[in-house]
Amino acid sequence: KNEVEQSPQNLTAQEGEFITINCSYSVGISALHWLQQHPGGGIVSLFMLSSGKKKHGRLIATINIQEKHSSLHITASHPRDSAVYICAVSRTDKLIFGTGTRLQVFP
Amino acid sequence: KAGVTQTPRYLIKTRGQQVTLSCSPISGHRSVSWYQQTPGQGLQFLFEYFSETQRNKGNFPGRFSGRQFSNSRSEMNVSTLELGDSALYLCASSSAVSSYNEQFFGPGTRLTVL
């Protein structure tokens, strides 16, 4: 079993839909990261959080430390949100990555 | 501020050769981490350098090595290349003294081993 699990693996949405991507982890962490990777490879850090909730524009990330679970929400999705979203957890010595969720948003 | 830069962006090598990849962090960042991304294994941590010292290391063979210079620029080297080393190699820099605060990623170097 992977230490970081994401669901779903693939997600298709119509423009304007509300999207949720989930991340569960089984190890102790110091922080959880949500990353976005567009075709071509570049990765952008969206959020780093260790408790509670953070919001940036149409993106919201939450984490429940007791349940070892985090969610990334996208409100009013847009085709430009199409990308792979990766959850990663920080331990004292490294980052451990989930396998990613491929999101496609159609007009 | 300029972002993280990596050179070269694309590289084609043959089995048995060696390769050196370069990463220039954001100005002022002292931590540089390297990652390998393949379709089969996803993203995996290679190593992290801070102030010219390797602070953490992932589970990769000794053919993978790195170093960091006094200006925080970092290089990674892969010797005796294998077909399975074909991957996107990403570096990321961070300003924090403690490991694994927010990471800023470079565009990556896509290595193809023939």
Image (spheres, coloured by chain):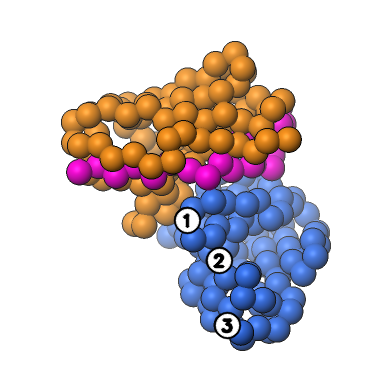
Using the numbered discs, state the Cα–Cα distance from disc 1 to disc 3 in whole angstroms. Answer: 20 Å
Specify the label residue A16 is tagged with. none
* Mark 2 secondary-structure assignment: strand
Left or right position of A59 against A38: right
Using the numbered discs, state the Cα–Cα distance from disc 3 to disc 2 in whole angstroms. Answer: 12 Å
Left or right position of A105 against B64: right
Left or right position of A15 against B107: right
Q: Residue at x 69, y 39 (%)?
A: B101
Amino acid at dot 3: Phe
According to the picture, the residue beneath numbered tag 3 turns out to be A106
Residue B92 against residue A74 in the figure, above or below: above
- Shown in orange, the chain is B
Marks 1 and 2, the one that precedes in the sequence: 1
Q: Residue at x 34, y 57 (%)?
A: B40
According to the picture, the residue beneath numbered tag 2 turns out to be A83
The residue nearer to you, when weighing B106 against B48, is: B106
Marks 1 and 3, the one that precedes in the sequence: 1
According to the picture, the residue beneath numbered tag 1 turns out to be A40
* Mark 3 secondary-structure assignment: strand
